[in-house]
Image (cartoon, rainbow, N blue to C red):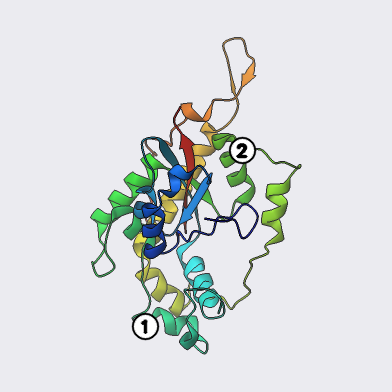
Amino acid sequence: MTFPVKNVLNMDTHTPKGLQQSLEINLVNSGQIDVLVSNYFLAGSALFTPEHQGRAFTIMRHPIELAESLFHYRKSASWEISYRKKWKHWAFADYAKSDYYMANWMVRQLSGTMPNEDVDETHLEKAKQVLRRKILVGISSQWEETIRQFKYYFGWEDKTPFCSLNYIGAKSNANDHPRLERGSENWNIVAEKEKWDMALYYYALELFSAQSERLRPQRDANGDIFQNKPDQFSPPAAVSGNEGQDSAQSGLSSKKQM
């Protein structure tokens, strides 16, 4: 294992093959990583051990916006394993109607549902339960508040003032592309395909709001302000009200047990 790019280890945890290799070399126990990012939540979680446990987090994005962005990126990013040359002249609507389109990725990952299985309400409820109990939720359209919560929860600090927000604000990996008009025929077609991930996304917004209240400095009996240690915080056990009538990669932060 080497670091070809500063602070980035040359292990691919975005593919099943890479995850298997990471498991075989006992990656998490190597002491060389602080954060692991993967598209495969359950397989990524399996890399952790009793000696090196993890805390899960994700940054959720509106499922239709995410699907559009990934499609346009994969048809142009020739350096990526996921590059699809045959999509070069496709419109997103063509892709959404094709057999290549896999809907409800987040619900499938959190509920352990295979690509060839149909998804229903029971899978959604299982995904909600995992998201609520196991994962710290961020929202891509609310970066500043997401970073604030993550820094509070994990105890992360900027080495230079505002470096995290400046890095995100630079949008170095932004990919300009056409966007479906909200409420259009094609938008509605994709929304129907992604209805379970849509419901999970709106539920995640509620979790994110609840986290915002919990991840703030508190006052002790004397009125002095203090911050809860990350070990004392767990994601909200319940969210009241509408649970999503109407997604993203996940990460795990390494936590060494002393």
- Compute the Cα span from label 1 to label 2: 42 Å
Q: Earlier in the sequence, mark 1 or mark 2?
A: 1
The residue where tag 2 is placed is 156
From the viewer's perspective, is residue 243 above or below residue 170?
above
Q: Quadrant of residue 98?
A: bottom left
Binning the other alpha carbons within 10 Å of mark 2 as few (below 14), some (14 to 19) or many (20 upward) gives few
> What residue occupies the far right of the structure in this picture?
161
Residue 86 coordinates in the image, percent (x, y): 46, 88
From the viewer's perspective, is residue 22 above or below residue 88?
above
Q: Residue at x 75, y 42 (%)?
A: 160
At mark 1, the secondary structure is loop
**Tag 1: amino acid:** Ser
Q: Is residue 241 visible?
A: no
The one nearer the camera, 44 or 2, is 2
Task: Kindly report which numbered mark, 1 or 2, lies closer to the viewer in this rendering.
Answer: 2
The one nearer the camera, 161 or 139, is 161
From the viewer's perspective, is residue 155 above or below residue 102?
above
From the viewer's perspective, is residue 160 above or below residue 91?
above
Residue 41 coordinates in the image, percent (x, y): 38, 53
User: Tag on residue 98?
Assistant: 1
Q: Residue at x 38, y 48 (%)?
A: 47
**Tag 2: amino acid:** Trp
Q: Quadrant of residue 54?
A: top left
Q: Residue at x 47, y 36 (%)?
A: 255
Residue 131 coordinates in the image, percent (x, y): 38, 46
